[in-house]
Image (spheres, rainbow, N blue to C red):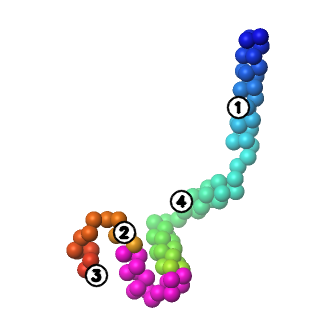
Amino acid sequence: MKAARQKFYRWWRRGSLDSRRYTSDAMHSVADDLREEQRERIARMTPTERFALSERLGEEGLAEFMSANKLSRADALKAIRRSRRIGRKPSRCLDEER
């Protein structure tokens, strides 16, 4: 009886491994496709274009933050700088406005 149980277990494990292999090989997510497309698009960019993209995305993020919190640009930048200091050891040089 023990041999039959071991044989069944090996058969069952092989089946479960095959099903996992099918799922990971045959199916992929839309997010994986989008990530790959984004990597390829950024790889084709020149360093200048990548820098311009990062600047544009930063400005868009700041605009969203300003809109969501109803702040001016200066106040939004202060709030972001303040939030970066949360949990850090206090420092007099960081308390001074730049």
**Location of mark 1 (residue):** 17
> Crowding near pointer 2: few (<14 within 10 Å), some, many (20+)?
few
Earlier along the polypeptide chain: callout 4 or callout 2? 4
At mark 3, the secondary structure is loop
- Residue at the far left: name it: 92
Q: What residue type is labelled 1?
A: Leu
Side (left or right) of 26 relative to 81: right
State how far apart marks 2 and 3 are (Cα): 18 Å
**In the rendering, which numbered label is found on residue 86?**
2
Give x and y (percent) for residue 76.
43, 82
Q: In which quarter of the image is residue 26?
A: top right
Is 40 or 97 nearer to us in this picture?
97
How far separated are the C-alphas under marks 4 and 1?
36 Å
Residue wearing tag 3: 98
Magenta span of residues: 66-82
Q: What residue type is labelled 4?
A: Ala
Residue type at numbered disc 2: Ile
Between the C-alphas of marks 1 and 2, the distance is 47 Å
For marks 2 and 3 on the same chain, the one whose residue lies earlier in the sequence: 2
Please state if 26 lies on the left or on the right of 38 as rendered.
Answer: right
Q: In the figure, 90 relative to 96: above or below?
A: above
Look at the numbered disc 1 and give the secondary structure of its residue: helix
Q: Mark 3: few, some, or many residues within 10 Å (few <14, many ≥20)?
A: few
Is 73 one of the magenta-colored residues? yes
Any magenta on residue 21? no
The tag on residue 43 is 4
